[in-house]
Image (spheres, rainbow, N blue to C red):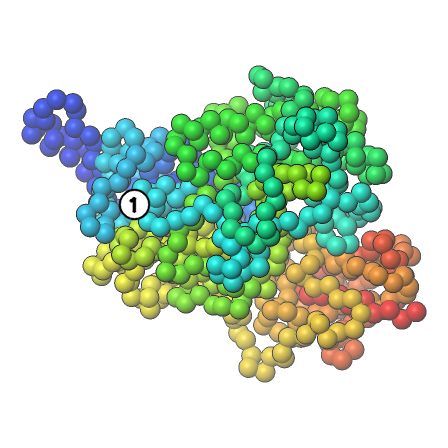
Amino acid sequence: MQTKSLSALTLTLIVSLWLCGTVGAAAPEIVECDVCVYGGTSGGVVAAVQALRMGKRAVIVEAGRHLGGMSSGGLSYSDMGRAATVGGMAREFYERVGRKYGQQLETRLEPHVAEEVFREMAREANVMVRFGQSIASVQQEGRRITALVATDGTIYRAEMFIDATYEGDLMAKAGVSCTVLREANSQYGETLNGIQLWEIPEREWGKPGKNGRRPDRRGVWDRAIPLDPYVRRGDPSSGLLPLLQAGTLGEIGDAAAGVQSYCFRLCLTDEPANRISIAPPADYDPSRYELVARYVEACRKAGDAMDLRWFSKFDPLPNDKFDFNTAYFGLNFVGGSLEYPEADHKRRAEILEEHEAYARGLLHFLATDERVPKNVRDDVSRFGLCKDEFRDNGGWPHQLYVREARRMVSDLVMTEHHCRGTKTAKKPVGLASYGIDIHEIRRIVHKGVVVREGKLLGHTGTRGPYPVGYGAIVPKQDECENLLVTFALSASHVAFGSIRMEPVLMILSQSAATAAVQAIDQGVPIQRVDYEKLRGRLLADGQILLAASSGASSRRPAPVDVSKLEGVVVDTESAELAGEWTRSNAQGPFTGDGYLHDANTGRSGLKTARFTPTIVESGVYDVRLIYAPFKNRARNVAVTIESADGGKKVVVNQRLSPRQGGRFRSIGRHRFERGREGAVIVSNRGAEGFVVADAVQFVLVK
């Protein structure tokens, strides 16, 4: 079906209003369409494109002047989760980005390249995009939204509306139930919700491995050490230092206010020709960062060989760029997010400025203050903003990383149980697979020292991909019958920590747009869409709705129960991965819910799986590789064993069945010492065939 020209329709309406002789102030512009998408995020673009591809008129109403949200706004090292769960238009996006780099698929994105792809997708589909349009109100008749009204008076009329914003503003204006609270654990029978304190500051840290992590997987960017919080050390009456919030811890698991902390994800470079120096804020005051100075002092006193990783996890991007994330004292402006979710547009703009000032000030402090180790000062100084990124904003990202704001409360609320697989959501419209990743909410004083409250220590596994149910992206029918919500969806604070990733936003937005079009065609409320027809179209468009392997044999062996194996077993849930791996369970044996393979691509050696054991008893260990053999496997898989004996490289033929119980292949006996990191690294460098990474077993022999 050929889509109608929105611009022509808009012009016709304006002329008609003028001909009617409107008296007084000029009549507002009226834009009519079938599907109105509020928010030009990655999900907003996908939703509008899908609606157009299905023959409907669609418009994106975007408050800013860019498309792609965080995917083009600095979150460049994509939180993919398990790539095999990403299908449909989300995968199309990463494939189109890949083609820009001569690759099949790419999840490390330069921001300008990501936005270029989003704009191409919107342009090819003839999506109308209206920039600089913030929501002021909605017009409603009964339980239906009839129009979105922008702050400049423009009226957007549509049959269906999709809220693809990070804030859930359209949802809130429509009067749909939502929350900004962390629920009590008791509300949904969870264990990780409400007030949380997982991190106990400790003097001794231990020597991290080459990957910046301890054997328990904690990275140096999460190094916690006891710090005195008071202006005059040891004197509570002197008041708290800057960057701390007042208040007590409260009871673990109780309901509490607060959403995850925000930051700017900075795209930085150390390439002089493309580098812009990062200026401090106009009101820079080093005393604001006294707590950071005390952190440096305490870490150095404890023997930490500090480097840049103590202050940012930074990941490489194409063309000599890096995605700078956060750390214990990093780019997260802890406490700065608390007002944001329900603030008006003016206050939000101020909060963005506060986050920028904090980040610029921190980087200037780390680059110039004599209390910071010289190697850290030198490292921070060599990085700068990129001349070819965010050109209209001096190299600074245009998008604040809003990790969490409002969350809808509907008939289906996704919870920790869905993430853990103890409950399964009905009517799936996509899969989520990333760990439960919740950043700190408050930095407060507890038992006389500084702590990060609300932070879950590292990613908490989800035990495999899990479905997100259709009921989580639609409101209760008695509240609104023509709205879908794709980021601020119905989920507990815990579940949201896993679902919130950009690939899932795109997946759910494509599904939402498909449902919106079908609701129009069927003439039913959005809650009454025929799910079987919806499911059929989603599958036809490449969406992945179930975490089931393709080509599965009914004779496939049952998964290996890791808990029943002797020794220390490290599987891919705990491995550090580099490069794009694909999950499968098409062949056995395997541990957990499957194994990883390299898809027989990327022979540059960028794909590695590092298995790091926690050794509690020094000695010689028989090291055994667990993998699923098959005729398409590589005969020359490069495996490196890092032990107390040094490094040793072996080659494994993964076409051959493991010799020990049909499960394990010994790759030699090696000495490992308690408290000293060792590892086994599986690489696809130079491999000819599929490379499998599943698990490594360490069995003490003497």
Please provide percent x and percent y for residue 217: 72, 53
Left or right: 452 in relation to 490:
right
Please name whichever residue, 573 or 338, is drawn nearer the observer in this view of the structure.
338
Residue at screen point 73% across, 44% down: 201
Left or right: 129 in relation to 402:
left
Please provide percent x and percent y for residue 53: 32, 51
Determine whether 621 is above or below 245 in the image: below
Please provide percent x and percent y for residue 445: 66, 38
Q: Secondary structure at mark 1?
A: loop
Q: Alpha-carbon neighbours of circle 1 within 10 Å: few (<14), some, or many (≥20)? A: some
Residue at screen point 64% across, 75% down: 559
> Does the image show residue 495?
yes
Q: Quadrant of residue 368?
A: top right
Determine whether 443 is above or below 471 in the image: above
Please name whichever residue, 602 or 259, is drawn nearer the observer in this view of the structure.
259
> Does the image show residue 429?
no
Please provide percent x and percent y for residue 349: 44, 28
Residue at screen point 88% across, 58% down: 673
Disc 1 residue type (three-letter):
Ala
Determine whether 557 is above or below 585 in the image: below
Residue sitting farthest toward the bottom = 555
Residue at screen point 7% across, 29% down: 20
Please name whichever residue, 237 or 181, is drawn nearer the observer in this view of the structure.
237
Q: Quadrant of residue 334?
A: top right
Left or right: 88 in relation to 372:
left
Q: Quadrant of the C terminus?
A: bottom right
Q: Which residue is mark 1?
A: 174
Q: Quadrant of residue 476?
A: bottom left
